[in-house]
Image: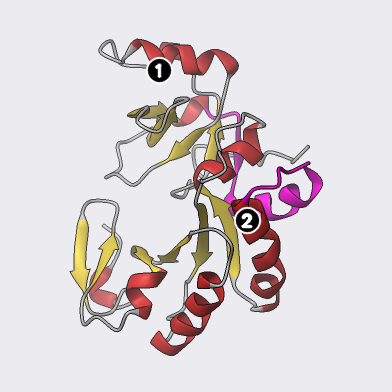
Amino acid sequence: MIKRLAQTSQSPYLPHDLLWGFAPRHLPADAPTWVAEALCVEPPVVVRRAQGVAGMIAVGVRGQSRDQRFACWMPLTAVTGCVRPEQLIELQQARKQRDWPLFEALAQLTGPLNQSGLRWGICGSLGFQLASAIEVTHPASDLDLLIRAERPMSRSQAKTLLALLDNAPAAVDVQLQCPAGAVALREWASGSSKVMLKTQTQPLLVSDPWAHECAVA
């Protein structure tokens, strides 16, 4: 079983981190019924991008169906553990997996990504499933990955990496986590003069996701 990283109110949580400790009592009064039902099995919630609120962290609750997603706020004091996408690389090798395209894609890409020197991890539905042991993937599920791109990645490097992903047996979506936000690897590799940078406050069209003017709000 993967070790959950203990966190304190002084430690930052990052988008795509999975947090434990969120309970029905933390829900707003207008939350749909399915949200409280989903929390009965004590699943993790995922950190989402939103402008900060003192003492709170923006999270999302996941239900059984694809359309069941609920955005809310979690008290920092309620967090009992955290699992980051990078931690799930080792866990996916230890857990029994189905003979589905996304698992084949992950097995195919793990070696090359590890050898690339990039810091990467698993997020999305498979990340949630690996961390919680709650099955939410299906045979047609995409593979969602995250790359920590603190330093600029060249367009040519992005194209080389994208070519590797496009040879995988399942659709693979990769987000580059830059200091100011996240940009899709496919969009950065496209050569477009402007790309969409998802920040804590709003999406921005920028020419360079790593530029100083894109400082975190």
Q: Position of residue 99 (x, y in %)?
A: 70, 47
The span from disc 2 to disc 1 (Cα, nearest Å) is: 27 Å
**x%, y% of residue 81?**
61, 34
As for residue 94 lying within the magenta part, the answer is yes
Give the quadrant of residue 104.
bottom right
Crowding at label 1, few (<14), some or many (≥20) Cα neighbours within 10 Å? some
- Disc 1 is placed on an element classified as helix
The boundaries of the magenta stretch are: 79-100
Q: Mark 1 sits on what residue?
A: 35
Name the residue at 40% across, 17% down: 35
Asked whether, in this view, residue 114 is left or right of residue 143, the answer is right
The correct choice, above or below, for 85 with respect to 67 in the image is: below
Residue type, numbered disc 2: Glu
In the picture, the quarter occupied by the N terminus is top right
- Label 2 vs label 1, nearer the camera: 1
Q: Nearer the viewer, residue 190 or 102?
A: 102
Q: Is residue 206 left or right of residue 121?
A: left
Badge 2 vs badge 1, beta-carbon distance below 8 Å: no
Q: Which comes before the other along the chain, label 2 or label 1?
A: 1
Give the vertical position of 159 relative to 114 (above or below).
below
Q: Is residue 193 visible from the viewing direction of this image?
A: yes
Check residue 96 for magenta coloring: yes
| Residue drawn at (28%, 67%) of the image | 215
| Residue topped by disc 2 | 86
The amino acid at mark 1 is Val
Which numbered dot is residue 115?
A: none
Look at the image and tell me whether residue 6 can be seen: no
Relative depth, front residue between 195 and 67: 67
Residue 199 image position (x, y, % from top left): 29, 57
Using the image as rendered, state which of residue 4 and residue 206 is in the foreground.
206
